[in-house]
Amino acid sequence: MYRGPIPRDRATMLLPIADPPSGPDGVVALLRALLRAARRQRVALVLWCLACIAAAALYAYTATPSYTATARILLDPRRPTPAPSQESAALLDASRAESELQVLRSERLLALVFQKLNLIDHPEFSPKPPGVVDLLRARIDAALRVVRPAPSRDEVRQSVFEAFERNLSARRVGQSYVIEVSYSATDPDLARKVANAAVSAYLWQSLVVKAEAAKSGAEFIQGRVTTLNLEVQAAAAAVAGGTLPAAPTPDADARVIGAALQPLKPTAPRKPLILMFGAAVGVFGGFLALAAGLAMDRRIRHRSDIEIKLGMSCLAAIPEVSRRIVSRRGRRMELASLASSRPTGAFGSALRDLRIAIELAAIGKAHESNFAVALVPCTPRAGSTLIGANLACLLRDAGTRVTIIDADMSGSPEWDVLDPASTTAPCLADLLKHGPVAEPMHLPVSRGVRVIPARSQSVVVDHVVYLGGPAMTQVVEDARLEGCVILDLPPLSRVAEARVAALCADMVVVVAEAGRTTLDELDDAVRTLRSAGANVIGAVLNRVRT
């Protein structure tokens, strides 16, 4: 009678082989993977988005409000000429408008406004309390005993002026000759004063040039000089007071078309925009983290990961059993026959797929002798015991006698599903230690399935037995005489001799746990078993979350 393993080409030919990846391109596959990851991590994703929105709301409602005041002037080069000999002004072109805009932004003009309003002593620019970075730098300096000199008066003035300069902006409105001068500050009155003073300083600077030109002109007219002097004095007083000139300034190259009013509400922070930005950061940041996690995550979550990435047959994808079923010991015992008691459920359908795959691999041998299949978990607690118990029940329901051999000596099964009727029956450890008995073994029967438990009464015996010796082969052969054999082996990562014990079976099924077993662990387990000569027909993915 033939006892050797099934030829690998024969078994593989009868099994459903994973088809090569086709259909959706990489972008669609990535989007589907992201959606699956988002569904799987939906709680963490929602919490991350809420945290981002809460952080944005905290910033929006605790940040110091900022007010912006805007004054508008119109560049106007056309002015009355005092004498026929004076040249008339040319029309303003685009380059001239840009030049005047740079004059408004010049440091000389801004320094005049800064000086006239005496902003060096304004509370807006007073020293702020040290921040986190300043405190950290101070601690580092103290630890390193570094003494930094205090800033001088000029350095303080320069830093304050730079802060003032950053808050003032001047821009041209489209292609028109209108220039907007804006200033932002936490004090709305200061914002209004600086915007108006900047416009008045521009007018004053233009009028000073006209007055000097009139004094040095060939056609000196005392009335003209007096008028210009009055306009210059009005502009200078407006700069010092942070207002617009009280008297008209028709000789300036620009005229005011809109005074800066004191803002009634803050322009910053923009709370709705900040909240939207926080939500966007939460969503896109969450999906970006999921994408990075998918790129770095090598854990197996779906049967397609096994079939496409490893090119291996996934015989069944077994869903995770609800913890409510195992809340009491009485219900725990029902797990061994869960596939039989609930044949229409997802768990029962997956176990039937596994049984069909094993029976297909055993075609050509079933008429000669009963087959032996080994279940090898990649990692501890992968659930091979539960799978073996339910597989045995399905084979029993089909009229096949089944024997389960528990070969895990190092720990108890994850589920207490094997309930031997007699504790005095021979266990695997005693059989391997003392050798097979001459008379037939009286195995305990649990719900119509014969069981050979793994551990004996002596802990010493459990640790000295060897699963890869001839005694193990003889035990499997003796159990095969009674029917089909399901060999529940320990994980390869914990017991190296499991790969030798797998040679006792006609076929080997590797059990991977969804969400925990990595592709590398499964690939290493299959390579290790095949290098030892085992007939690995495929893998089973257990505890798949639906």
Image (cartoon, rainbow, N blue to C red):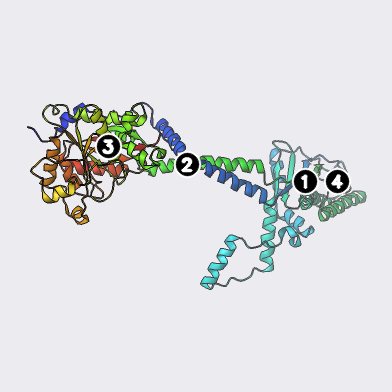
User: What distance separates the C-alpha of mark 2 from that of mark 1?
Assistant: 40 Å
Q: Which mark is residue 288?
A: 2
The amino acid marked with disc number 1 is Pro
Between marks 2 and 1 in the image, the one whose residue lies nearer the viewer: 2
The amino acid marked with disc number 3 is Ala
Q: Earlier in the sequence, mark 2 or mark 1?
A: 1
Residue beneath label 1, please? 263
* Quadrant of the snapshot with the N terminus: top left
Is residue 310 among what the camera can see?
no
User: What distance separates the C-alpha of mark 4 from that of mark 3?
Assistant: 100 Å
* Quadrant of the snapshot with the C terminus: top left
Residue beneath label 4, please? 249
> Residue 95's x, y, as percent?
68, 41
423 or 513: nearer the eye? 423
Q: Circle 2 sits in a helix, a strand or a loop, which is it? A: helix
The amino acid marked with disc number 2 is Leu
Q: Circle 1 sits in a helix, a strand or a loop, which is it? A: loop
For image coordinates 14% across by 40% down, the residue present is 476
User: What distance separates the C-alpha of mark 1 from that of mark 4?
Assistant: 26 Å
**Image side of residue 328 versus residue 494, left or right:** right
For image coordinates 67% across by 46% down, the residue present is 269
Between marks 4 and 3 in the image, the one whose residue lies nearer the viewer: 3
Residue beneath label 3, please? 389
Is residue 534 among what the camera can see?
yes
Q: Earlier in the sequence, mark 4 or mark 2?
A: 4
Taking 336 as reference, is 490 above or below it? below
User: What distance separates the C-alpha of mark 2 from that of mark 3?
Assistant: 42 Å
Taking 232 as reference, is 520 above or below it? above
Q: Circle 4 sits in a helix, a strand or a loop, which is it? A: loop
